[in-house]
Image: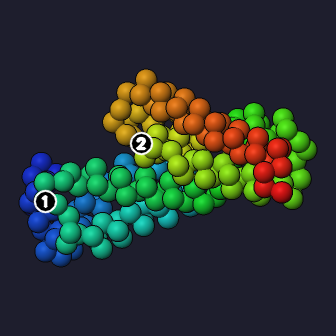
């Protein structure tokens, strides 16, 4: 029987903090498969999944000395992996706004799309998103940039699906309002 166990999470973290490589090996052996399965559900890409899992275990080892002994090790590791996925996905999907409903409802209706007027409009949409209240923005970005379902967002953030829906509705309303004001100013020649 192993001297390590997730049943005594605090002791496991203490041994990890002390640099116990056998403890780290135990954690790796126990969590590599579930973590891989978890991340693969998001990526659907074996190589990317492997990179994220490897990165997550490296981060766990790097941050071991600053771990809170009261924290749940499995939750901490899965959060590192999920955050890494979000960071990678955000970088790859930076232009997701082109097909977003905000863009379709506010920009395409006013004039033809060309490279000259696309950049300032995307910047304005980015500014509108950045100005959202913190939680509202977090929910909106998980939905729009990461294409997560409302249920997935609710589970990830520990909130109800109804709260997720409310945040998304509020975000869309606030963004539309800001972008619409900007478009009215543009069309009235305010920036010329």
In the rendered image, residue 28, in percent from the top left (x then y), is placed at: 30, 62
- Count neighbours of disc 2 (C-alpha within 10 A) and say few if under 14, some if 14 to 19, many if 20 or more: few
| Residue positioned 27% across, 52% down in the render | 74
| Quadrant in which residue 158 is drawn | top left
| Residue positioned 46% across, 40% down in the render | 136
Does residue 150 lie above or below 98 as drawn?
Answer: above
Q: Nearer the viewer, residue 26 or 174?
A: 174
Does residue 139 lie above or below 73 as drawn?
Answer: above
Q: Are marks 1 and 2 in contact (CB under 8 Å)?
A: no
- Asked if residue 138 lies left or right of residue 27, the reply is right
| Residue positioned 42% across, 66% down in the render | 54
Say what secondary structure mark 2 lies in: helix
- Asked if residue 3 lies left or right of residue 80, the reply is left
- Asked if residue 179 lies left or right of residue 10, the reply is right
Q: Quadrant of the N terminus?
A: bottom left
| Residue positioned 28% across, 50% down in the render | 75
| Picture disc at residue 190 | none
Dot placed on the residue nearer the N-terminal end, 1 or 2: 1
Residue 82 seen from this side? yes
Q: Quadrant of the C terminus?
A: bottom right
Say what secondary structure mark 1 lies in: loop
In the rendered image, residue 190, in percent from the top left (x then y), is placed at: 78, 51
Does residue 115 lie above or below 66 as drawn?
Answer: above
In the rendered image, residue 179, in percent from the top left (x then y), is placed at: 68, 42
Task: Tell me how far mark 1 sits from mark 2, CA to CA.
Answer: 28 Å
| Residue annotated with mark 2 | 135
- Disc 1 vs disc 2: which is toward the camera? 2
Q: Nearer the viewer, residue 127 or 150?
A: 127
């Amino acid at each position: 029987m192993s001297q390590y166990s997730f049943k005594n999470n605090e002791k496991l973290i203490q041994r990890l903090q002390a640099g116990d490589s056998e403890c780290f090996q135990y954690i790796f052996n126990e969590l590599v498969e579930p973590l891989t399965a978890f991340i693969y559900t998001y990526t659907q890409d074996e190589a990317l999944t492997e990179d994220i899992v490897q990165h997550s275990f490296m981060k766990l080892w790097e941050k071991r000395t600053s771990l809170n002994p009261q924290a749940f090790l499995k939750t901490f590791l899965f959060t590192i992996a999920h955050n890494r996925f979000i960071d990678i996905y955000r970088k790859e999907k930076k232009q997701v706004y082109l097909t977003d409903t905000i863009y379709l409802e506010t920009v395409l209706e006013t004039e033809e799309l060309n490279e000259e007027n696309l950049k300032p409009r995307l910047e304005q949409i980015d500014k509108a998103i950045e100005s959202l209240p913190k939680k509202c923005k977090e929910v909106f970005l998980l939905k729009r940039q990461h294409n997560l379902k409302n249920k997935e967002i609710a589970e990830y953030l520990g909130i109800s699906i109804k709260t997720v829906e409310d945040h998304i509705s509020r975000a869309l309303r606030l963004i539309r309002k800001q972008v619409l004001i900007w478009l009215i100013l543009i069309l009235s020649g305010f920036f010329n």
